Amino acid sequence: MNKNDNPAPIALFLYNRPYHTKQTLAALKRNKLADESHLYIFCDGPKENASDETRTSIQEVRNIATQESWCKQVDVILSDKNKGLAESIKEGVTQVVQKHHKVIVMEDDLITSPAFLTYMNSALAHYEERKSVFSISGYTMPSKMMQIPADYEYDVYVGLRNDSWGWATWEDRWKQVDWNVSNYQTILNNSAMQEAFNRGGDDVFEMLQMQQSGKLNIWSIQFTVAHFVNHAVSIIPVVSYVDNIGLDGSGENCGESLALRHQSLCTKEEIRFLNVLYEDKRIINAFYSANCRQKRPLWQKAINRIARFLGRKNIFVIKKKIYC
């Protein structure tokens, strides 16, 4: 980020998890650029049949959102009705980028490194004119899930899908998302296109099918389709700046997955950015393998869990490649 540039605004989406919300905001406040940043907090409303307990939690979240000056400027936007996470993000991100032309997006369960905002703003500035970069990610999988080659010389790598756990984009990229996915039938009827789409992980086409059939209410798969049809990429850090504390079964779209948690986060501020946007086949293969849906036998899962508990890597890893 240039010295004369203002930090990108932050859009934070909250609902009914006060415990997670307090930790997320406290970590954000500890960021180096928090006292220079504009924070928009979008609080979703209760569903019509919400219980008293849920309504109490929603109010607690709103109280937390307004109790401190978490950033230099904080605007809290309250919704009377429940929009759901997908509509909240589509509307909220659109509102912010139309005003500021760029945005950093967070949800209520993300613990960020104190260098998170520095990294995100530097990446936004570095890749702003590289129109084939559609998104910046703050999260990457732990090394026990996905190994980066020891001789890789950059602090970021090219990914083929967006990541929703702390990310950023620009207005001109966001405007290219087709929320209806009008080319869905073309992808559905073309197995070669599906295979190409799944290079970002063999789960993405299935997610698109579920979203189109109404079984999954998400926004991120449409953004991934926008990456795909525009031959665009995401920039992902080698070491994560974000930890997801919502992998405890409390979230709308995340189950329990302690394997994706981080014990420590990156604090590096001087980033070796990738200027030639090439796909390192070793990293692409590692990412693809880590996102494989193939099921392991229960006994292998048990041994992997014990290995992770002891601080070691998974013993049994399903190797899948898209580059031989």
Image: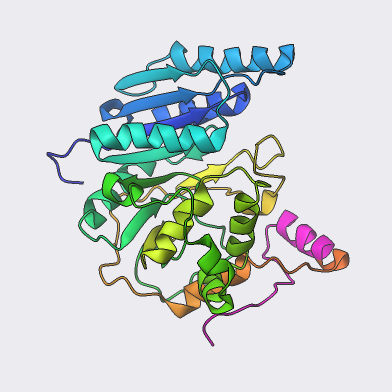
When the figure is inspected, residue 172 is found, relative to residue 90, above or below; the finding is below
Who is closer to the viewer here, 300 or 184? Answer: 184
Please, which residue is most extreme toward the left here? 4
When the figure is inspected, residue 245 is found, relative to residue 202, above or below; the finding is above
Residue sitting at 40 percent across and 27 percent down? Answer: 29
**Residue 156 picture location, percent across and down:** 37, 62
- Relative side of 71 to 53, left or right: left
Residue sitting at 41 percent across and 32 percent down? Answer: 92
Answer with the quarter of the image where residue 230 lies.
bottom left
When the figure is inspected, residue 35 is found, relative to residue 129, above or below; the finding is above
**Residue 20 picture location, percent across and down:** 59, 29
Q: Is residue 317 visible?
A: yes
Q: How many marks?
A: 0
Residue sitting at 24 percent across and 61 percent down? Answer: 130
Who is closer to the viewer here, 62 or 244? Answer: 62
**Residue 11 picture location, percent across and down:** 40, 32
Scheme of colours in the image: rainbow
Quadrant position of the C terminus in the picture: bottom right
Q: Is residue 149 visible?
A: no
Magenta segment boundaries in residue numbering:
301-324
When the figure is inspected, residue 285 is found, relative to residue 261, above or below; the finding is below
Query: Is the magenta region chiefly helix, strand or loop?
Result: loop
**Residue 33 picture location, percent across and down:** 30, 34
Residue sitting at 72 percent across and 39 percent down? Answer: 249
Q: Is residue 270 magenta?
A: no
Please, which residue is most extreme toward the bottom here? 324
Who is closer to the viewer here, 307 or 174? Answer: 174
- Relative side of 104 to 262, left or right: left
